[in-house]
Amino acid sequence: MPSTTRVRQLAPGERLGPFLDVAWTFNAADPQWIAPLRMVLETVLNPRKHPFHEHADVALFLAERDGKAVGRVAAVVNRLHNETHGDRTGFFGLFECEDDPATAAALLDAASGWLKARGMEVMQGPMNLSTNEEIASPGVLIDGFHTPPFITMSHNPPYYAALMDGAGMGKAKDLVAYHIPSAEVPQRLQRGVDAILARHGATVRSLRMKDFTREVQVIKDVYNSAWSLNWGFVPFTDEEFDHVAKDMKQIVDPDLCLIAEVKGEPVGFSLTLPDVNQALRHLPDGRLLPFGVFKFLWHKRKVNRARVITLGFKPGFQSSGLGAAFYLKTFINSKARGYGSGEGSWILEDNWDMRHALEKMGCTVYKTYRIYDRPI
């Protein structure tokens, strides 16, 4: 008689080890997968340690058979999202599962049942845990399995898309990642950017680390204004932004975090991060302490690629052409620091302003991630 798979919700305060370990069960044999840092996961999932939980409720579910975990999922009610968009959308994330449609369906049904009981009408995901708290990027990787992910981007087994389809999940939105090759900056691009900056009376400067606290406030104000009309946008709370900034401060290169100003007023910013996944791949168990930190610091010196993680402008400047200035300066500064190539991600499939700008510089789409949804 075949064994029965049971899905159960983790009790408050229950040890997270078995839930976290599922990621290694289904990914550790993949040479392209980068193990997440356990301490980061534990912090984000701890309501006492992370500000996300001040406006969100999270439930964790494990699928078990014969005493062995065969899948997991998180269910999330993000009250700030629903207040912002005026809807009743719940989310699922941190999805990991064996190649079995019944197990996947049971996990997603458990998540949707929990969300429905809290008044949600649609389930969307995977979100890990939101577009602001990205343990890993949204969506299921559906193509581009041949290379490892950049910092905070997702990677999963190829069969996950079929599991989503089999569980009745439909496409909500695709996200794309662009490969940015090493190349010389065309002189015509430099001339064009100079003309755009002059026309707007604009300047582009690097992050001032000596005034980091004030700079964080400047960036937060730009972000919450610039991204307000974007699909899936949720404003950062002060506590969330401070938490993210504290983490980013450890790895940010100030010359790759750029702020655009017009007559002294900040109107846009872009952030490019060194791809520390190149160092993290040498910590296959995901443990930074006690000894992993030495491996990480050693290999961090050898990082030679970067990810353009975000770029945007306040309303009124979003079609100004100033984005080209960000790309140009990022290109020049990255090359000067020895970053031979990079990635632009994640980008909404219908964000043609950004996509066309990247394609004009010879960048090409090489990975696609799919966000799914279904009524509940």
Image: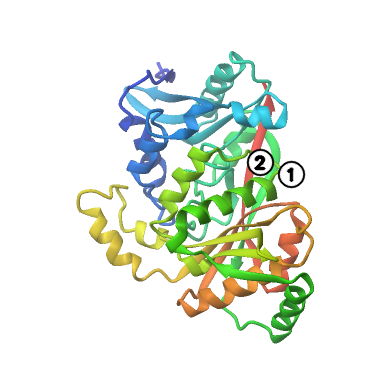
Q: Which amino acid does label 2 sit on?
A: Phe
Secondary element under disc 1, as helix, strand or loop, is loop
Secondary element under disc 2, as helix, strand or loop, is loop
- Evaluate whether residue 2 shows in this view: yes
Residue at the far front in the pictured view: 264
Locate residue 180 relative to residue 172 in the image: left or right.
left
Mark 1 Cα within 10 Å, few/some/many (few <14, many 20+)? Answer: few
Question: Residue at image x 30%, y 26%?
Answer: 15
Residue 278 at x, y percent in the picture: 40, 62
Give how far apart the Cα atoms at labels 2 and 1 are: 7 Å
Residue at the far bottom in the pictured view: 187
Disc 2: which residue: 233
Residue 141 at x, y percent in the picture: 57, 48
Colour mode of the rendering = rainbow
Question: Residue at image x 41%, y 41%?
Answer: 26
> Which quadrant is home to the N terminus?
top left
> Depth check: 218 or 151 in front?
218
Q: In which quarter of the image is residue 326?
A: bottom right
Residue at the far top in the pictured view: 117
- Evaluate whether residue 180 shows in this view: no
Residue 124 at x, y percent in the picture: 63, 32
Q: Please determine whether, in this image, residue 226 is positioned above or below residue 160.
A: below
Residue 50 at x, y percent in the picture: 42, 35
Q: Which amino acid does label 1 sit on?
A: Leu
Mark 2 Cα within 10 Å, few/some/many (few <14, many 20+)? Answer: some
**Count of number-bearing discs:** 2
Q: Please determine whether, in this image, residue 337 is positioned above or below residue 75.
A: below
Numbered mark located on residue 371 in the image = none
Disc 1: which residue: 229
Question: Residue at image x 31%, y 32%?
Answer: 17
Whether the residues at callouts 2 and 1 have beta carbons within 8 Å, the answer is yes
> Depth check: 223 or 162 in front?
223
